[in-house]
Image (spheres, rainbow, N blue to C red):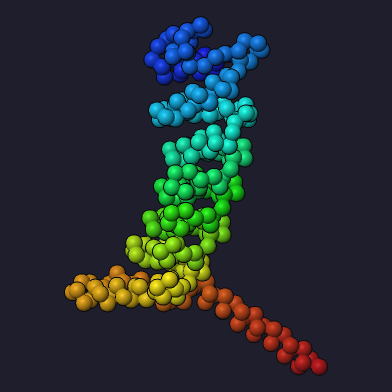
């Protein structure tokens, strides 16, 4: 009962009239209809989505949270895929983590597309909403889905913006480090172009190919070398590009450690057989 009173109070504030809580008011002032047929009053589903749409349109996020939670309690019964998609994208766009979790737990289509052809994960990655992106990934969102207009993947958006945490999360979830956009951009080339050196290191250690060619035959390392030369020609400092080139050319520490382990393993096997032969 206390929950119902609080809910009605929120609606009254939303419409700006105390009459919104009274039964029998006009359609313009009455936000919801309550059914007294049971002890637990329920919001009718048709009215619920109507009011939720109105709240989203006016960006009343607090009210959206309340209505979305009520819809979740009703398991979104009677909702079309279009209605579900509208709520999910609104939640992602406004970084409303709780609603995103409810949508994902209710098995909404996480690969739906709206606007400029982005999925919820692509939108979260583009806007650097790390918590939302991580939850979508753990709920099964495709880490390699690409933007319809540009061909950008979530890893490309994260690499371009220098979002180290999200880059690591995407790589852990098997994002393709060697994907190419429609214009031939890779996560590595985007990190290089925006001087995100730590991202360059992360991508390289994850297997990003420094010699991956785009449609023009350019590679990340050749591009870094080119811009380094152009800087010198124009009398500019080339330190930035020289540092990036060193990062690209050096051998990954992980690979070096692996080689050492393999060598020590082989040597231990040889010593073992030598001992056996000496005993004979």
Single out the residue that lies furthest toward the right.
280
User: Which residue: 22% across, 76% down?
Assistant: 232
User: Which residue: 37% across, 66% down?
Assistant: 192
Q: How many marks?
A: 0
Quarter location, residue 28: top left
| Image vertical order of residue 192 relative to residue 14, above or below | below
Left or right: 175, with 199 as reference point: right
**Quadrant housing the C terminus:** bottom right
Q: Position of residue 190 (x, y in %)?
A: 39, 63
Can residue 209 be seen from the camera position used here? yes
Of residues 115 and 110, the one drawn nearer to the viewer in this rendering: 115
| Image vertical order of residue 278 relative to residue 74, above or below | below
Q: Position of residue 266 (x, y in %)?
A: 65, 83
Q: Position of residue 16 (x, y in %)?
A: 38, 15
User: Which residue: 27% across, 77% down?
Assistant: 229
Single out the residue that lies furthest toward the left.
235
Q: Position of residue 157 (x, y in %)?
A: 42, 55
| Image vertical order of residue 212 relative to residue 25, above or below | below
User: Which residue: 44% across, 26% down?
Assistant: 55
Quarter location, residue 227: bottom left
């Amino acid at each position: 009962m206390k929950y119902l009173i609080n809910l009605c109070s929120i609606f009254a504030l939303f419409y700006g009239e105390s009459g919104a809580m009274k039964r029998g008011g006009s359609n313009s002032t009455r936000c919801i209809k309550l059914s007294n047929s049971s002890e637990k009053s329920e919001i009718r589903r048709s009215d619920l989505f109507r009011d939720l749409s109105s709240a989203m349109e006016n960006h009343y996020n607090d009210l959206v949270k309340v209505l979305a939670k009520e819809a979740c309690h009703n398991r979104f019964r009677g909702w079309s895929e279009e209605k579900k998609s509208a709520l999910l994208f609104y939640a992602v766009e406004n970084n409303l983590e709780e609603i995103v979790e409810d949508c994902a737990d209710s098995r909404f289509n996480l690969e739906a597309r709206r606007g400029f052809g982005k999925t919820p994960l692509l939108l979260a990655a583009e806007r650097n909403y790390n918590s939302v992106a991580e939850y979508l990934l753990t709920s099964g969102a495709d880490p390699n889905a690409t933007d319809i207009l540009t061909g950008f993947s979530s890893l490309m958006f994260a690499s371009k913006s220098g979002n180290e945490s999200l880059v690591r999360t995407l790589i852990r979830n098997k994002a393709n480090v060697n994907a190419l956009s429609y214009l031939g951009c890779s996560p590595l080339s985007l990190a290089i172009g925006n001087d995100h050196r730590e991202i360059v290191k992360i991508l390289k250690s994850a297997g990003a190919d420094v010699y991956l060619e785009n449609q023009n035959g350019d590679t990340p390392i050749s591009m870094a070398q080119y811009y380094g030369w152009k800087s010198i020609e124009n009398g500019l400092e080339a330190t930035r590009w020289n540092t990036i080139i060193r990062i690209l050319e050096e051998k990954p520490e992980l690979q070096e450690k692996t080689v050492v382990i393999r060598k020590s393993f082989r040597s231990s096997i040889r010593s073992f057989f030598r001992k056996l032969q000496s005993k004979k």
